[in-house]
Amino acid sequence: MIVAEHLTKRFADKTAVDDVSFTVQPGKVTGFLGPNGAGKSTTMRMIVGLDRPTSGRTTVAGQEYRALRAPITEVGVLLDAKAVHGGRSALNHLRAIAATHGIPRSRVDEVIELAGIGSVSRTRAGKFSLGMGQRLGLAAALLGDPHTLILDEPVNGLDPEGVRWVREFVRYAAGEGRTVLLSSHLMSEMAQTADHVVVLGRGKVLADAPLDDLVRAWTTTTVRVQSPRATELATLIAGPDVRVESPTPGVLQVEGATAASIGDTAADGGIPLHELATTTGSLEEAYLALTESAVEYKTKEFA
Amino acid sequence: MTALTDTPAVVPAVRARPPHRLTFAGQLRSEAVKFATVRSTWWSIGITVVLTIGIALLLAATVSGHMDRPIMVAVAPIQFTMLLAGILGAITVTGEYSTGMIRSTLTANPIRGSVLAAKAIVVGGLMFVIGFVTFLLGALVSMPILAAKDITLDWASGAGVWLPLLAASFALTMCTLLGVGLGFAIRSGAGTIAAVVGILFVLPVVTSMFPPEGSWSWVSKLGHYLPMTASQDLILPSDYSHLSAGVAFLTLCAWAAVALGAAWGSVRTRDA
């Protein structure tokens, strides 16, 4: 479990993280979303003790990161910036990290295989492609078989096979009861991976909710109806909370009514239906609506 | 029913496994692995060995007549190799900052003072051993040349041979630690190397330009406390020494201590 309490980080000229509080629960994949510069990476860096908060605190498994007796068996971290000496081979990089905790060579070989970098493990990391570097970063994060995974843009630069591997791996890890905090700009990927999302905007928490709730709250569900007697149907289903549009003749887009009620109404009126389909919003739509409103809110505040 | 059968095994991940713990011994091993697995280390050591032995041979070939302390030919090359030692110390640290490796290092071990201590012990300790072996080699290879001129090294003499060899290795180690400390304090490779070169090479030249007498004599006197001069006075104390061997020893310790103190202040307070 990761807890952030009133976390604030001010740099000389800006406040990167502003009174942020959230809890990342074990057994779930928590997505960490937000525009560039929203403070996601800074927050992650504070969780693992690289940056010191201006105020507030973070704990992992109830302790501050600096107080952990075996940090890499508790937390596996992959940061967005490279954290590897380019002159050292992948194998030696991992050996150096493993040595701090007395993790045996067999585990080093294991994570090399797990991350799929066996063929390049003796190549200097400076020659790695973005994707290979990312796999090495994942191997390092997994070295201590950690209870908690903090992954900043883990699929950045990965091939489709790698993207899928990361998704399945974090789902599996969460299924085992581990805590996973994951940031990504790929909304479709996040929608498939995360159970819960924390959205940051301008250093503040905009939303902290189960993914499904977030999507439901920030998007509209529409029902698409096709009928030869569409106009007639439109008048029948009309009501104060129902909005009906007809993009093309014979097709209706209905907001505020369920497919079931529209179908029932049509059946009562003896109106044939050729199509009746519910379209729910996507995480991307919800995210854009949410972050856009945050920006508008800010603008109004200063106006 | 479904609730029972469908309940996934969401339990805190508690697994039976060997207790891998962060230890200082582990941090020392990690630093040793890091030291040994980049090419720049071996380049620096290679150049140090070649320069030391090469200059020792050159000096052995050019000296003539009676020599009070012929071990001088083996330890005098430190005037050049101390710079390499300082730079090697610096790049073991700045290499981590410039590549981002420091983030891996500090997440694996968030106790920053222990990272600094382990780095200083490993890099300084290895440099002491490497320095001692190299100076010894320099003495051994120049023996035949000196012997041809009827100059002999008295290996039974502690003060004549072994003490200068140990003192030179010690001075080399202090220069390495100066580099390590400045590396953590400055972080930038170019900046740190400039500072190392400045302290070890440029300042001695500058202070030597000032007259030893008169109102500016304090500059010249301060120059006696630079690592370069202090090293000379420690390794081969003579009637011309500015500092006693004891003071020279403490002076070198102080340089390393101040640099490591600055490093400690920086590494504990600054974001990585």
Image (cartoon, rainbow, N blue to C red):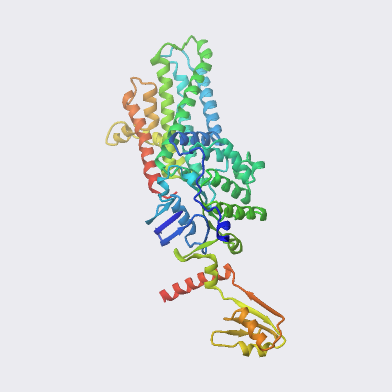
Does A270 sit above or below residue A48? below
Does A88 sit above or below residue B51? below
Does B69 sit above or below residue B124? above
Q: Looking at the image, can residue B16 be seen?
A: yes
Q: Looking at the image, can residue B188 be seen?
A: no
Q: Which quarter of the figure has residue A262?
A: bottom right
Q: Which image quadrant: the N terminus of chain B? A: bottom right
Q: Residue furthest front?
A: B1
Q: Position of residue B180 (x, y in %)?
A: 44, 37
Residue at 53% from the left image edge and 23% from the top image edge:
B53
Of residue A74 and residue A40, the one placed in the foreground of this image is A74
Q: Position of residue B17 (x, y in %)?
A: 52, 39
Residue at 53% from the left image edge and 17% from the top image edge:
B141
Q: Position of residue B143 (x, y in %)?
A: 51, 14
Q: Position of residue A147 (x, y in %)?
A: 50, 48
Of residue B141 and residue A20, the one placed in the foreground of this image is A20
Residue at 50% from the left image edge and 36% from the top image edge:
A102
